[in-house]
Image (spheres, grey):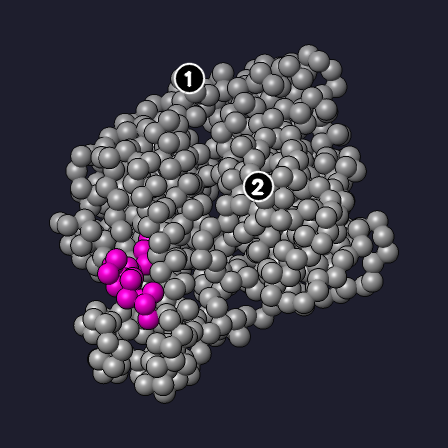
Amino acid sequence: MKGLLDLDLVFVTGKGGVGKTTVAAALAQLAGRRGNRVLVCEMDRSDALTTQLEADPVGFTPREVTPGVFAMTMDTEASLREYLKLQLRVPIVGKIGGLARALDFVATAAPGVRDILAIGKLCYEVRERHYDVVIVDAPASGHVVGLLSAPQAINELVKVGPIRDQTDWMVEILRDPGRTGAVIVTTPEEMPVEETLELAGRLSRETVVPLSAVVVNRVLPELFGTREEAVFEWLLAPDRVAKISESVGGDVSLLFAGARLAVDLRRTRAEHLERLQAGLDRSVPVLLVPYLFARSEGLRATNQLATFLEEELGT
Amino acid sequence: MPGVRRRYLREMTGQGEVTERGSKTQAHPPRGGSFEGLLASREIAITCGPGGVGKTTTAAAAAAMAACRHGGRVLVLTVDPARRLAGALGLSGIGNEERRVPDEAFRAWGVVPRGELWAAMLDTKQSWDSLIRRHAPDARTRDQILANPLYRNITGRFVQSHDYIAMERLFEIHSEGTYDLIVVDTPPSRHAIDFLDAPRRMAEFFSSKLLRWLIAPYRSRLVNIASRPFSQVADRLLGTQFLVDISEFFVLFQSLYDGFVQRAEAVSRLLRARRTSFIVVTTLESASVQEVESLTREIQKRGLHLGAIVLNKVLPEYFASAMLAQTARELADRAGSVSQSLGGEPDLTERVLREIADSFLNFNVVARREAKQQQEFRPASDVVTTVPWLDGDVSDIGTLLRVGERLWE
């Protein structure tokens, strides 16, 4: 398998709240730094991605937001218009005034319609090679499987005709481990790890998209090794705490309580990390990025994350 | 053995005597402005908020506390596709059917609940099927719908159909009158807004003129659908079999029309009723706070009752202290000389002291950011409750009750 940054199409997913968008933005920055022409696509209209890149909101038409990085927001109606215009040369496109309403209506009945239009647009950009790499800030765990399996779902429903031909080439792109990959972002906490393992299973069972990497975000630094930990316990004796407090001119007991909490948090998280690694296929690289204390959002945090990812990728 | 529980809860809060609350059937003093009062006065509480903030845990903790303190039968219904609640509730797997959390799970923590805690997880497919069974005019229509490939695809594959069916299931359970309180957990907030609108969208969909127009040729048995321009395009795109499936699906669904629309309207009414309240859960990360601000606006715009805001995973207050940060800096500066004075292994001790100081200063930055965030956050509810970061996970009833205790305060 090729490296993450050699792929043409990368879906970044994970449980809500783990920093999926920041990782997608960081991967885009990293690819951009290396001189690639990058398309990064936000799948909902929250503008979270452009916020992470410190850029104004974008629409369906991509705009260069940082050097080499073009951002867009998925819009299924616009995607349908483009598709009808480019792929089928349907003559009445200009006349379909009620397209938005009709699409809304059909999508209410069959939500997969939106999924296929979204994934179709992404695959189209890959096929036409408008960019070196397309990075998708994909929906969270529960929804990404629906998105990635939409072409097969349509294949099951529609047996013949141009739609069928359309989905076939999409599946070809999506299943190629040299071109397409999913990245699951997680944190070393119980539920995110559980959901990551569950999602990894569902991706391999229900979609053709290969899992390229798991990014573990917000890994806490290790405070003490075994010897340091023994010293820490030794320091906790009341007379020593009192003595230290006296020397520094302030009560240090809460500083010690804080360190205790940090050690406990780190320990629980280390256990989850082990569980994650044990539950994943060994061929899937697990990239660790540290908890950023100083900044949690914006371009600064995104760039820092990009640097950590670069180190982890070791390329 | 209520005494055991009181002792347990006293330990939890570190406070004095915990007073007994009457069960929900008994008269209650008005307790406006507290989380506890909210759960005592409502029949349905719906937790919503951004992803990863702890909605499921909050829902489960609130339900567990209500079952312990208020008594009665309390149900926690999780609609999130991931199966996460089971572990914390000591259930091997929660299905579509409600199951009681055994009292032993509480007793293990020295708690004897006054009431009963029940749990259920939403199984979208099963719920849809039972909805079809209920509304289908006859057995033949029922079987045709259940066997229609489009129907199977929609209900089986696409999680979005959770939105409506979750509300529908809530309505069904509520109307059976089995529970004193139902606490419902929802998908993340972008979807939570969808979820608020799901019943209305469902009703609109089935009342749509477009739907009637689309299936008209099939109704009049004029199979020549190519006579219409729209169908012509659709036929070219999708192929005839798919159109037949889709039309059959809609035609069949039309027979369920009245039942569906009525039902969707009833579900909407229930969500707006005063006995239903929304609990918004968030962390103090800026992205979450922004999302929550827009979510609370949406809730209020729709005339729904916003009962409480839960600030979850907040760092302990001492981390934000400027005085302690100063002490930490002093400690870092004097780590060398302090270590010398303590004996032992000074080099190692110095390293440890520096780490302690450093770690504190790291968390101090985060805590100050959170405090600022909390200050600027204009809560739209008078009930705002804070739950701190736990050092471990919520994987048992004891931890769940610890979270519940903080909600109650």
Residue B301 visible to the viewer: no
Q: Residue at x 23, y 57 (%)?
A: A308
Percent x, y for residue B27? 86, 56
Circle 2 — which element?
A: loop
Residue B89's mark?
A: 2
Q: Is residue B346 above or below residue B228?
A: below
Residue A237's mark?
A: none
Task: Tell me if A127 is positioned left or right of A43 in this view.
Answer: left
Q: Nearer the viewer, residue B341 or A144?
A: B341
Residue A168 visible to the viewer: yes
Percent x, y for residue A304? 26, 62
Q: CA distance from mark 1 to mark 2?
A: 45 Å
Task: Tell me if B220 is positioned left or right of A274 in this view.
Answer: right
Q: Residue at x 33, y 36 (%)?
A: A279
Percent x, y for residue B113? 69, 46
Task: Say what amino acid the circle numbered 1 marks.
Answer: Lys
Determine if the magenta segment contains residue A226: yes
Task: Say what amino acid the circle numbered 2 marks.
Answer: Leu
Q: Is residue B321 above or below residue A264?
A: below
Which class describes the residues within 10 Å of circle 1: few (<14), some (14-19), or many (20+)? Answer: some
Residue interval drawn in magenta: A217-235
Q: Residue at x 20, y 46 (%)?
A: A5
Residue A159's mark?
A: 1
